[in-house]
Image: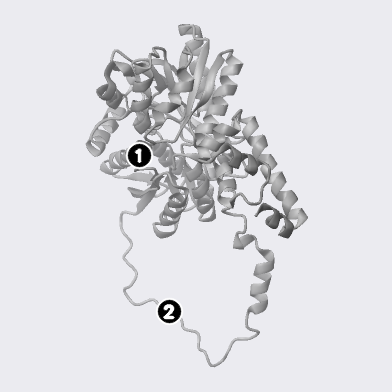
Amino acid sequence: MKRILEAQMPLSVAASLEKFAGNIRVARLRRRLTAEEVARSLGVHRTTYGRLEAGDPAVSIGLYASAVYVLGLGLPLGDLVDPRSDEEGQLLDLIRLPKRARGDRPIRVRRPQIGALPKRSSEPVLKIGVLGAMSGPAAAWGLASKYCAEATAEMYNDAGGVEIGSERYRIEIVSFDDGMHPGRAAEGARFLTETQGVRYIIGPNVEQTIAAAAPVAERNRAMLFPYSFTRSLYRPPHENTVLCQVANYQAAPRIYQYLKEREGVQTFSIVAPSTPEGLQQRTELMRITKEIGLRMISGSGFYRPGADDIERALIPALATMPDVLALPNLAPSDSVRLIARAREMGFSGPITTEAAQDAEILVKSIGSRADGLVMLGGASPINSRNARMQDFMARYVRLAGQWNDEAGTKVHTLELILATLQMAGGSSPNDIRSFKAAIPNFSIENPMSNRHSLLTYWGDRDLRHKRQIGIPLVVNTISGGELKNLFVEEPSEFLR
């Protein structure tokens, strides 16, 4: 079959395929992944993957696309033959248009019926979208975004709404569950922007869903406020995405320097999900720990989020016990199983993740085995929560059933969106241009903390323009079954 395909394939096409396959190999090597590891992530044999990297035309196009995807390089086929970029096809459409209008076919005009337009409400509505994974292994991430937005909206609505320009708006939250599937994320972005008329969307949660939703948002002049750490999603020419939490490449240097100085750690192993986000965070972590001076014992532990056998990924990581076990991009539904199994295998050191986890569920599920988990905390430190934060937490518990410290990392998102809209003025609820113009000079006092803390937009260093909400870096640990704070740093300390 390969020889037949090669015989029929133009030389220039074959050369292009070989170059594409070679680029995939370079991407794998840059991430320090073996061919066996990537083949396992793709669910194929090592020899099949070898044919892929050789540019074999008999390898399915789906496998090539999947390889690009698992290496964190996006979705290569979605826009490849976009009709909007097909200049020849557009020209042919123009040629096929009738040369003149036919006089025997009257133009039908739909006229508005008297009384069809609704009366203008005395209380205009500002719709805010929430797009994220509200089902599946990462459901806790999307649900935390949803409940945070609803709790904040409730606080404003109970106080009479939010005043923007000369209008006072009631806030309505419109949510869409993307299930962490790119196709659903694009569908959700279309629903929110085209059907609901939303211009400001909180989410999505991970790289692959943001990459699918962002083109829709840009086309429909809407803003996304996602939680993926991938820099390229926010860098120019992208202007409509704003990173809404502290990224792993910003938190990890502080966390591992702290563990090195305070705990004397020298070695580590990594176990990561075989997703674009997980592989990207693994690569970042390897670079950061090398700069700090830590030695990696194992980086070959991979798993599929939510799979039945994720604990097997711990075997290479703990074959020789490291000082630290790193679990980047750890989904809440996987944390209990991986942490519990690591302790059962005899690992007693710190377990790190640059994401927040539900400490209450962890302690209830696995007890003292949760001790030693080091994680990102809510952006309002435990001992600095003011009355407004306490009110927010009470409302969140009423909506969600219980408090989740993951919510603490998302509490500021809608607050900053609304405050930026107020600064931008009257046209901003429907015109994101004025919102974006307000970003460079925006700054408010942290409304959720009793310590002096300014919330503003950052990103000049990491994203090449201000497209990150600058919130405090809060690092917590579980000790004695309780959530305790290790340290807090302001954006001016870790983002400069």
Amino acid type, callout 2: Arg
Task: Give the residue at mark 2.
Answer: 110
Residue labelled with disc 1: 139
Image quarter in which the N terminus is found: bottom right
At label 1, the amino acid type is: Ala
SS state under label 2 = loop
Q: Quadrant of the C terminus?
A: top right
In the image: residue 386, left or right of residue 353: left
Is there any visible trace of residue 190 in the rendered image? yes
Q: In percent of the image, x 62 and y 44: which residue is there?
A: 237
Q: Residues within 10 Å of mark 1 (few under 14, many from 20)?
A: many
Q: x, y (%) of residue 150?
A: 31, 42
All told, the count of numbered labels is 2
- CA–CA distance between discs 2 and 1? 45 Å
Q: Secondary structure at mark 1?
A: helix
Residue 224 is left or right of residue 311, and the answer is: right
* Residue at x 54%, y 26% (from the top left corner): 249
- Looking at the image, is mark 2 or mark 1 nearer the viewer? 1
Where residue 289 sits: x, y (%)?
56, 18
Give the residue drawn at x 59%, y 51%: 61
Answer whether residue 452 is visible to the viewer in this image: no
Compared to residue 400, the image places residue 355 above or below, namely above
Residue toward you, 423 or 319:
319
- Whichever of labels 2 and 1 marks the residue nearer the N terminus, that label is 2
Residue 450 relative to residue 199: left or right: left
Q: Is residue 36 left or right of residue 389?
A: right
